[in-house]
Image (spheres, helix red, strand yellow):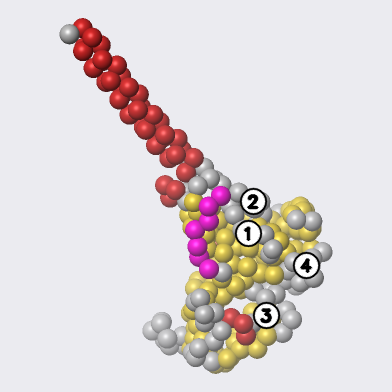
Amino acid sequence: MHETVRHNTIKRNHHLKNIIKIICLGLLTSFYGCLPGMGEWDITLYEQKIEGTSKAIYKYDAWGGRDSHLAGYAILDTTETFTIQRVSKLPITQLNGIPSKNLIKTIGTESSKETSDFFPTATEKTKSEGINIEIKKYKGNSFRRKSQGLWRYDFTKFEETRDSLFFYDLDDNISKDKSHIDSLRIRKGNIIIRQKENKEIIQIVIEHLILSNDGKDSIKSNRTYFLKPKTETKSGQFSDYGIFKEKSTVPYNV
């Protein structure tokens, strides 16, 4: 009988150890799933190629385990696979013009509770993937104070030059006043094309920041546009430079 009790005790202890191992493994998996760069990430990518090089600047929005969220900009060679673990996030909030292989001009923000003017507080320089980056820093509330809201239009046609996009025959079909404008010029850099798998454009999102051209670079206005073509338009009708184009949203394991 004592042998039977001893055997049952050993069996229970072995079973308890297995339960503890399973719990520990679950906790460890949960812990690593919450760490940036670990586990599976669902990533939405927007790619803007950099002229004269195989590199591109990416705008990314990534969701991981337990609602982990990472977003920002990074530079990576287009021959490499984008993963959260591989990229180094740039300390910027948007671009300031079209990137080149020699220099990428950008905008950065710093938090402040103080009332600020609309001039840059500093200009910082860094480097990523061998490309020089200039960051013009502003107080975050400067952008909010110059914000002129969201503007939604459907456009008939467009034209593209080296540094700008021109949209024509724009109608606002959402607001009550149903406004119309003949044309809209947007400087390239912060233009995002959302598209279907067949490259048909869903929407063009534009962060239209205007700085003064007197050498002081003060913020004049800050608008966000949501534009939709009135007829089927493919993203291939736009160039790859100065414009972010959406890539497929797929899970990435790292």
Crowd rating for badge 4 (residues with CA inside 10 Å; few <14, some 14–19, many 20+)? few
How far separated are the C-alphas under marks 4 and 1? 17 Å
Mark 2 and mark 4 lie on one chain; the one further toward the N terminus is: 4
Q: In the rendered image, which residue does mark 2 sit on?
A: 86
Residue displayed at 59% across by 57% down: 72
Crowd rating for badge 3 (residues with CA inside 10 Å; few <14, some 14–19, many 20+)? some
Mark 2 and mark 3 lie on one chain; the one further toward the N terminus is: 2
| Quadrant including the N terminus | top left
Residue displayed at 29% across by 16% down: 10
Q: Judging from the image, what secondary structure is the residue with disc 3 in?
A: loop
Q: In the rendered image, which residue does mark 3 sit on?
A: 239
Residue 188 visible in the displayed image: no
Q: Which residues are magenta?
A: 248-254
What is the three-letter code of the residue carrying label 1? Thr
Residue 161, image x and y in percent?
A: 72, 84
Residue displayed at 72% across by 79% down: 163
Q: Is residue 146 left or right of residue 13?
A: right
Mark 4 and mark 3 lie on one chain; the one further toward the N terminus is: 4
How far separated are the C-alphas under marks 1 and 2? 9 Å
What is the three-letter code of the residue carrying label 4? Thr
Mark sitting on residue 53: 4
